[in-house]
Structure formats: structure tokens, C-alpha cells
Amino acid sequence: MEYYYEAKHVGISIYSVAMAILFFSAALASAAILRRKTGHLMKHGYGVLVLVMILAGIRLAAPLDFSFSWVIGSERIVPWIQSTFLQSPGEMAVWKLALVLWGIGSILYLAAGIGLFVRELRTMRDSTPVESDQVRRVLREMHLKGAVVIVSREIDVPKVIGFRKAYICLQELSVSDEELKEILRHEYEHYRGGDFFIKLLYLVLSALLWWNPVIHLFRKELDRILELRCDARVTRGMNVRQRAGYAEAILHVMRQTTKQQNLFKEKAGTLFRKTRGKFIRQRFELMLCEKTSAKRKAIPYLVAAVVFMLSYCVIIQPEYHEIPVEDQKGEILISKENAFILQKKDGTMEMWVNGEMFFEVGEEDLFCPPGSELEIVEEE
């Protein structure tokens, strides 16, 4: 007897999750490429980079499979991957072993990342503060709400840490009051922009997808995008002379920054990192460029939104064929309402339809409809 299943309108499957990770990786790669296009950023601003990252996060968090999606049936590659993971060379199936390794890797990666953050916090806590009349004087003039400035010789570069308060850490700098104001504005803008939270969130995401090379390649790009965003927010509303003063303050601090900065430290928002001259030059070019009209900015935002919506219109999964509606007479409808999979005590599985055992189910049947749509019930 033949059967057909009732297609769902929306749901989540292992294939939709795989597609979400694929599109997420492609979006991050696109953001990294756009970040290098200084001319594009001059015309359209940094906002499109932020939008692409937000949409990438939404796509990953919502790996939905819609009934209107165009299904690309794979007769070789996906079935081969599926059969490989379903093999059991020992007592444990390959897919179960992969999940265990995935989980162990995520725990170790997250622990290492948290350890670096804790070490950074301890360095800040244990550093010996240096009294600075200049800092106290400038802070009184600026009225930065919730800002606490720590000056210490143990601080390598200016940075900010904190959620409820902005703990701005500075090394001893030889700068004017106006330059110090620009530096404090820069670090405080990292705090207002939630950069510390963004980096912690990306750390968690990196731990979940530690095996994805795009995650590791994009980490430095995230730092740079946050720097560009911070510069743009600080210089918003400034005239050319004011932007030039801000750029000079940044350059002055760069010249005083120690060369022994640890590249592997995770920092919340740093003013300067060891990086290639191309990015430093890009920062100054974007600081000093004239702002463009809102019309010119709208096009890439629209393109990003359209691509995001279209990403839900395609999904790759093993080739299978549904029975046409006109040929369904006399067939058995299988849906969540009338069918389930019974997992027996001996490890075997059976599909039950309308209260009767229909056929035995193999692990490979759980990765495609109708098996992937049905509830699994354990035998009592």
C-alpha cells in the first residue's frame, strides 16, 4: 500500500538548520568583503554592514522551512552525507559521535574565551591607579553618565568594559584636554553602542559554531566594523575641522600606544590594535569624508533585505517525491494528527498510522518526510 504525507506550512528540520548556517556564513563573508570597500562605505555608510550582521543573526536564529520554499533535491551529495553520519563503525553512530565532539568543542571554546575575559577584568582590577588631575577635570566638563575612568601603567591600550557602567581604562597619555575628550568620547561610544555585549554574544556564537572557519575569519572583521561604527557615531554632526581634530587625537594616541599589545586578548572596545596600515588609512578616510544623502544609502539596505527574504525561498534536501493530489485516492494520509513513531525498548522503531503499525522505521527515515515530521514516542 502506498502513502503520502501532509506537507507542513512552516517548521524546522535538519535541512533548514543547515541552510541557515550556510546563509549565515555567506552573510558574514559578504560583510567582510563590503568592509574593505572604502568607496562603498563613503557612499552608503557603515549601516549596511550592521544590517547584514543583524540579518545574518536572525537567519541563524530562525532556521524555518516554509511550504513555499523551492526544494533542490540532491540525489548524491546530501544522501551521501546523510548515509555517512548514519553509519555505526562501533557501538556509537557517527552522527552521535559528531554531536558529542561538537558539544565538547563548544564547552572548551567557551571556557577559553571566558577565561580571557576574566583575565582582562582581573588585570583592570589589580592595576595600580595613577592619580590624574587632567582626567578628573575633563570628566567634570564632559558629564559622561556612568563613566568610571581608570588610569594605570599596566593598561596597554585605551579600552572600555562594562554593562551598567562604562569602565574606561587608559594608560598614561601625554595629550591635551581636547584630545583627551575625543579619546573619552570614543571609548564611551563603544559603551553606548553595546560593543562589550556584542563581543560576548559573538563569543557564545563562536563556541556554538567553533568548527565553522568563517566564524574565526570574521572575528577580526567584527572588531574593525565596530571601530568604524564607533568613529561614525562620534563624528556624526561634526564639521570638517572637528572631524580633523578627532582624527588627530586618534593618531596621537596611536603613536603612544605600546607595541607589545597581545593580539589574542579579547577586548570590549579598543581604540587601536596592531593591524595593517590599510585599515588605519580606511578609518581616517571615512572620518574625514563628506556624508552622502539618505537616497544613496537606501539601495544596499533594500538589497540586503531582499536577499534575506529570498534566502527562505530555497532549501536543499535529499530527493523524494510526493504523490500528486489527483493520485491520492485510496492512499493513506500521514500527518502529525494521525501518525507517530514508536521507539521500542529493543531500539527498533515503528511508524503507527490510525492506531495500527504501518512499517518499521530506520534511522535514515528520520531525516526526511514523513519521518522527520512525526513525534517519536517511547514504548512504556
Image: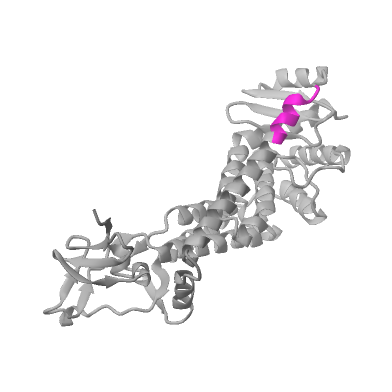
Depth check, front residue: 164 or 342: 342
Give the quadrant of residue 122. top right
| Residue at 44% across, 61% down | 17
Q: Is residue 249 left or right of residue 52?
A: right
| Residue at 37% across, 79% down | 319
Badge count: 0
Give the quadrant of residue 163. top right
Depth check, front residue: 258 or 236: 258
Q: Quadrant of the N terminus?
A: bottom left
Q: Is residue 292 left or right of residue 65?
A: right
Q: Is residue 22 above or below residue 186?
A: below
Q: Is residue 238 above or below residue 125?
A: below
Give the quadrant of residue 143. top right
Could you tell me what secondary structure mostly forms the magenta stretch? helix
Q: Position of residue 87 (x, y in %)?
A: 46, 72
Q: Position of residue 142 (x, y in %)?
A: 69, 23
| Residue at 54% across, 56% down | 102
Residue 346 within the magenta-colored segment of the rendering: no
| Magenta-colored span | 119-128
Q: Position of residue 20 (x, y in %)?
A: 47, 61
Please say whether residue 252 is visible from this viewpoint. yes
Q: Position of residue 42 (x, y in %)?
A: 67, 55
Which residue extends farthest left?
330
Please say whether residue 295 is visible from this viewpoint. no
